[in-house]
C-alpha cells in the first residue's frame, strides 16, 4: 500500500461517525456526496469496498462547504458519486484531482424538470441507479460482476416494494397538494399523483417575502392539507410560523436522513419515514 493510501485510510478511521469507514479493504474506497448515494453504493458494492459519505448529518448539500481537512481526507478514492446539476458543488473540488475519471453523476443524462436535481427521491430513479452502479463496480472489478448485479437486484426488490407501498398509500390520500420546506419533492410528487404547491424557502437560503407568505398560507388552506412539511437540515422557525398562520401542524420530510452513516438507516427506511409523514398530513 502506498504512503498516500495509508494516509488516506488513516484519515478515514479518524473521521466523524457519519463518514467513518469499516476496516481497511485494500484501498477500494468510494466517496459519495450524500447519504442516499452512499447507501445504494454500500448495498451494491458488498463487503470488499469502503463507502464513505461527505455530507455530515443534519447538513444540506445546497449550502455545505468543505472543511480544510476534507480535501485531504477524501483523496485517493476509486469511485466518486455525486448528484450533479448544482446540488452538491463541493464534489467538484473533491473530484478535481481525479481528472474526471471514475465519477458517477446521478443526473447525467436525466431529463430533469425545471432544473430540479432532487431526483433520488423518486424510488424509480433509485431503482435504476442501482443497475448503473452495478455497471460501474463491474468495470472496476470485473471478477465480481455477478455479485454486483445480484446485490443490485436484491436491493432493487426492496425499492420495488417501497414503490408499491407509496402507490397504495397515495390511493387513499384525501389531499393531493402540499407545501414543503424547499423545492425537493417534485419528482416524488409527480410519481404518485401529488403536487408540491409551494415551498417555505422559494430558493435555497432565501426567506419568503410578505407576498410569498400570503400565497403559501392560501395554498395550504385551499389544499385542505393538515400540515406544513419541514426538513431536519434546516431550522424550524419559518415552517413553524407558517404552520401556525395556516392553522395546521408541522411535520418532517427528510431528503437525506442518516443514510450516509454505515450504521444508519438505509434509503428504504428513510423513504418509509417520509411516507408516514405524508400519510399523517394528507390522508
Image (tube, rainbow, N blue to C red):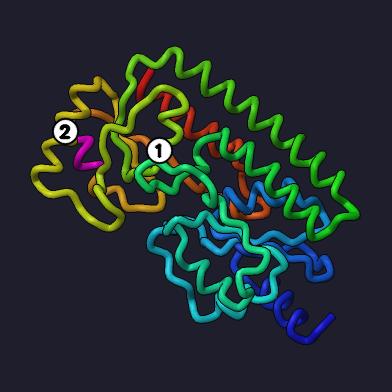
Look at discs 1 and 2 and give the one toward the viewer: 1
Label annotation for residue 283: none
Q: In the image, is residue 35 above or below residue 276?
A: below
**Foreground residue among 132 and 251:** 132
Question: Residue 54: which quarter of the image?
Answer: bottom right
Q: In the image, is residue 6 above or below residue 164?
A: below
Q: Is residue 196 magenta?
A: no
Q: Position of residue 106 (x, y in %)?
A: 56, 51
Classified by dominant secondary structure, the portion drawn in magenta counts as: helix
Q: Residue at x 48, y 76 (%)?
A: 67
Range shown magenta: 239-244
- Provide the residue designation for mark 1: 185
Q: In the image, is residue 12 above or below residue 234?
A: below
Among the two numbered marks 1 and 2 on one chain, the one whose residue lies closer to the N terminus: 1
Q: In the image, is residue 241 above or below residue 167?
A: below
Label 2 neighbour load within 10 Å: few <14, some 14-19, many 20+: some
Query: Do the residues bearing badges 1 and 2 touch, measured as CB atoms within 8 Å?
Result: no
Question: Residue 3: which quarter of the image?
Answer: bottom right
Q: Position of residue 179 (x, y in %)?
A: 29, 34
Whole-number angstrom distance, CA of label 1 to CA of label 2:
19 Å
Residue extending furthest toward the right: 143
Q: Residue at x 52, y 61 (%)?
A: 55
* Left or right for 272, reference 249: right
Amino acid at each position: 500500500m502506498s504512503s498516500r493510501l495509508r494516509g488516506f485510510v488513516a484519515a478515514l478511521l479518524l473521521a466523524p461517525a457519519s463518514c467513518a469507514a469499516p476496516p481497511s479493504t485494500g484501498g477500494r474506497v468510494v466517496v459519495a456526496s450524500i447519504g442516499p448515494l452512499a447507501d445504494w453504493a454500500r448495498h451494491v458494492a458488498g463487503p470488499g469496498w469502503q463507502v464513505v459519505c461527505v455530507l455530515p448529518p443534519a447538513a444540506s448539500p445546497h449550502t455545505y462547504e468543505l472543511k480544510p481537512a476534507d480535501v485531504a481526507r477524501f483523496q485517493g478514492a476509486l469511485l466518486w458519486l455525486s448528484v450533479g446539476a448544482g446540488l452538491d458543488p463541493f464534489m467538484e473540488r473533491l473530484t478535481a484531482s481525479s481528472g474526471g475519471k471514475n465519477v458517477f453523476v446521478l443526473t447525467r443524462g436525466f431529463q430533469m424538470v425545471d432544473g430540479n436535481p432532487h431526483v433520488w427521491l423518486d424510488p424509480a430513479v433509485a431503482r435504476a441507479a442501482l443497475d448503473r452502479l452495478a455497471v460501474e463496480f463491474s468495470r472496476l472489478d470485473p471478477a465480481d460482476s455477478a455479485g454486483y448485479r445480484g446485490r443490485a437486484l436484491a436491493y432493487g426488490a426492496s425499492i420495488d416494494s417501497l414503490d408499491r407501498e407509496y402507490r397504495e398509500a397515495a390511493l387513499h390520500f384525501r389531499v393531493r397538494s402540499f407545501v414543503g420546506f424547499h423545492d425537493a419533492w417534485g419528482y416524488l410528487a409527480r410519481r404518485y399523483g401529488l403536487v408540491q404547491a409551494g415551498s417555505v424557502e422559494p430558493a435555497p437560503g432565501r426567506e419568503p417575502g410578505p407576498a410569498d407568505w400570503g400565497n403559501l398560507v392560501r395554498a395550504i388552506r385551499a389544499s385542505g392539507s393538515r400540515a406544513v412539511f419541514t426538513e431536519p437540515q434546516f431550522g424550524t422557525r419559518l415552517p413553524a410560523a407558517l404552520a401556525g398562520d395556516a392553522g395546521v401542524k408541522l411535520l418532517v420530510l427528510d431528503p437525506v436522513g442518516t443514510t450516509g452513516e454505515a450504521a444508519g438507516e438505509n434509503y428504504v427506511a428513510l423513504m418509509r419515514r417520509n411516507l408516514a409523514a405524508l400519510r399523517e398530513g394528507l390522508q
